[in-house]
Structures are given as C-alpha cells and as structure tokens.
Amino acid sequence: MAEGVLVIGVGKSCKELPNYLSGTKEYLVQAKLGQATDTFDAMGEVTKTKDTSHITEELLNKTLPSFTGNITQVPPIYSALKIQGKRLYDYARRDIELPEPIKARNVYIEQLSLISLNQDMIELKVICGGGTYMRSLVHDLSISMGTCGHMTALKRTRQGIFHLSDALLLDDTLSKKIIIKGE
C-alpha cells in the first residue's frame, strides 16, 4: 500500500540521518470515500458506510483549505506511537481498551490539493511536515464533508531533498548488496 522515497542510513552514516530527514515530505494519497475502516486504510475491516453522492470537486476544493497550515490531528490507533510504554497497534490488535485517549498532535500541512475525483475515489497531493498521518487526514477530511473514508494507496514522492526520481528501486538485486549512489 505504501511506497516511494525512504531514506536509509548505513553504518556510521546513521548519525547523519537527522540532517537529511528534516524538511517537508510530499505524498500522493489515494482514498475511497463512503467506507470507513478500523485502520483508516484498505487493510482494515469496514466499520461504516455512508453516502457520497453529494461529494463534488467544488466541495472538495472548498474543504481542503481548512486542512492546511497548522492543524491538530489524532493519530490512528493502528500506529507505532506509545501510551504507557505500549504501542497503540498492540492495544488495537489485542482488542484492549486504551488506558487513556490518543492525544491530538499539532502537524503542519503546507499544501493540500485535489488531483482527481472519480466517483467515490480521490487522489490528493500533500506537502507536509513530519508526524502527519495521511490515514488520519483522509479520515478527518471525509468526516468534514459529511461522509467517511479510508486511504487506499500512499506514495511518498519526496523526503526533504530526496526525490522519487533520484531513488533506487528496492528489489531482489538491491537487497543482496549495498549500493552507494554517488554524485
């Protein structure tokens, strides 16, 4: 479901990763409106369905600006964040009630634009700061338009200075040896 740019450090270069991971990230996000899932993505179980006949490009373009700038966002329960030392996804997978609510976080979305709307499927371009959950963005955006939704695909096209066009493809060949791409 998720693909795209992943910056990896090897050996001593791991210490330099914070220098390379700063800056904004850019994503292409695909979503299905009218169906919510427990994971906020296509891997989860459908928990709700709602009408989408009122969703138009006009409504989307009117709604998107309210999700740009500094916003608050509640991360999905299926995430690696911790409450009382335990990962949220561990609580979710074991169907254990959370000891406290998931805290909303401040995130920054620099740009949010509609690429396409095809019936109940949308594609968005997102430029954001770190810590932003695309699954939560789709979930919250859908609710604000009077429906529900979940993410179906995610591609990170940029991480800071690293672009998808500069990336190496992780395949069987690459996984068998370390490749250092130089200038």
Image (cartoon, rainbow, N blue to C red):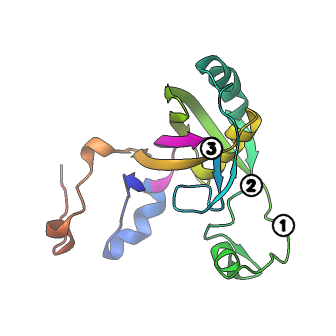
Q: Residues within 10 Å of mark 2 (few under 14, many from 20)?
A: some
Looking at the picture, which amino acid does disc 2 mark? Val
Among the 4 quarters of the image, the one containing residue 100: bottom right
| Distance of label 3 from label 1 (alpha carbons) | 20 Å
Q: Position of residue 172 (x, y in %)?
A: 17, 69
Span colored in magenta: 21-34
- In screen coordinates, is 7 left or right of 36? left
Residue 83 is a magenta residue? no
Q: Residue furthest right?
A: 100
Q: Nearer the viewer, mark 3 or mark 2?
A: 3
Left or right, residue 81 beside residue 4: right
- Picture disc at residue 141: none
Report the residue marked by disc 1.
Answer: 101
> For numbered disc 2, what is the local secondary structure?
loop
Q: Type of residue at label 1?
A: Pro
Q: Is residue 146 among what the camera can see?
A: yes
Secondary element at image label 3? helix
